[in-house]
Image: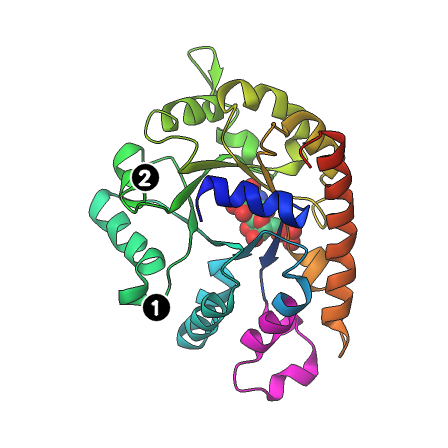
Amino acid sequence: MSRPQLIDQIKQKRTFLCVGLDTDIDKIPEFLKSYPDPVFEFNRRIIDATHDLCIAYKPNAAFYESRGVNGLQSLIATYKYLPKNCLSIIDAKRGDIGNTSDNYAKAFFREDISEMGFDAITVTPYMGNDSVTPYLKYDGKWVILLALTSSVGSKDFQYLETEGEFLYEKVIQKANTWAGADRLMFVVGATKSTEFTNIRKYAPDNFLLVPGVGAQGGSLQDVCKYGMTPDCGLIVNSSRSIIYAGHDENFADAARAEALKLQQQMQAELEKAEII
Ligand SMILES: O=C(O)c1cc(=O)[nH]c(=O)n1[C@@H]1O[C@H](COP(=O)(O)O)[C@@H](O)[C@H]1O
């Protein structure tokens, strides 16, 4: 999905919500366990219940890889089911030397080889240029680079000062010399909303993938106040607070209700900023 298409979807659907498919087989309703692929069945119902309220889905690879071959099958089935008008993000947080990154890129971008052709992948920046550029070779695909994460541990390295700047500021500036805002996004945690003004100095046009609203306590309103651009520039992810909102046969309705609350708040923010 290109940047103009993404912006168009945001305006049409009046939302910039990403539903995180962090599907833990131990947390899904018991009645689904009789299905051949319970995790896919769970995801299918979540997608059916939320696709008009969001513009992206983000399966987190860890929840699938932890189940070996079965997990990979659930991930492939989920990828194939994702609506084409939603940005598909694989949250894999990969990054390695060039030829290894080439293979990670194949794993998630080359549908002809791996059966998965996600639109975007999360990548760690710390091995530098040659670890990131293999993902950028794929025209039309996005790299979403970790900049300032929502985790408590973000202070360990991301706030280290070097040449008068924080390391995360350097990451954003350097990475923006590798690709434009039509190919590169950054992850910035919603729990870091006070930093958004600063981040926009270095990333005025990039879309930011913002996790941390919901279970981690980040404020959507603050994220919008400090991080929104004339193109919206935000994809706000929420995983647990949506997908585990209910625990019985009605879990998909409960997920929809949570997604709807966020969509309505997002619509209000888009209207306030006169984007729609
Ligand atoms: O890259 C991410 O998506 C990510 C970066 C970050 O800084 N913090 C963060 O929580 N995430 C991911 O975003 C999702 C957050 O899930 P919830 O806290 O359940 O909404 C998880 O899949 C995390 O792995």
| Circle 2: residue type | Val
Location of the C terminus (image quadrant): top right
Front residue of this view, candidates 242 and 47? 47
Residues in magenta?
24-46
Is 6 placed above or below 80 here?
Answer: above
Q: Which mark is residue 115?
A: 1
Element under disc 1: loop
Whole-percent x, y for residue 253 in the image? 76, 69
- Residue 145 position, x and y percent, is 44, 38
Q: Nearer the viewer, mark 2 or mark 1?
A: 1
Q: Nearer the viewer, residue 6 or 261?
A: 6
Q: 235 or 168: which is nearer to us?
A: 235
Q: Is 216 displayed left or right of 233 in the figure? A: right
Tag 2 residue:
132
Question: Residue placed at 37% from the left, 35% from the top?
Answer: 126
The reply to whether the magenta stretch includes residue 37 is: yes
Name of the residue lying farthest toward the bottom: 34
Which badge, 2 or 1, is on the more N-terminal residue? 1
Crowding at mark 1 (Cα within 10 Å: few <14, some 14-19, many 20+):
some
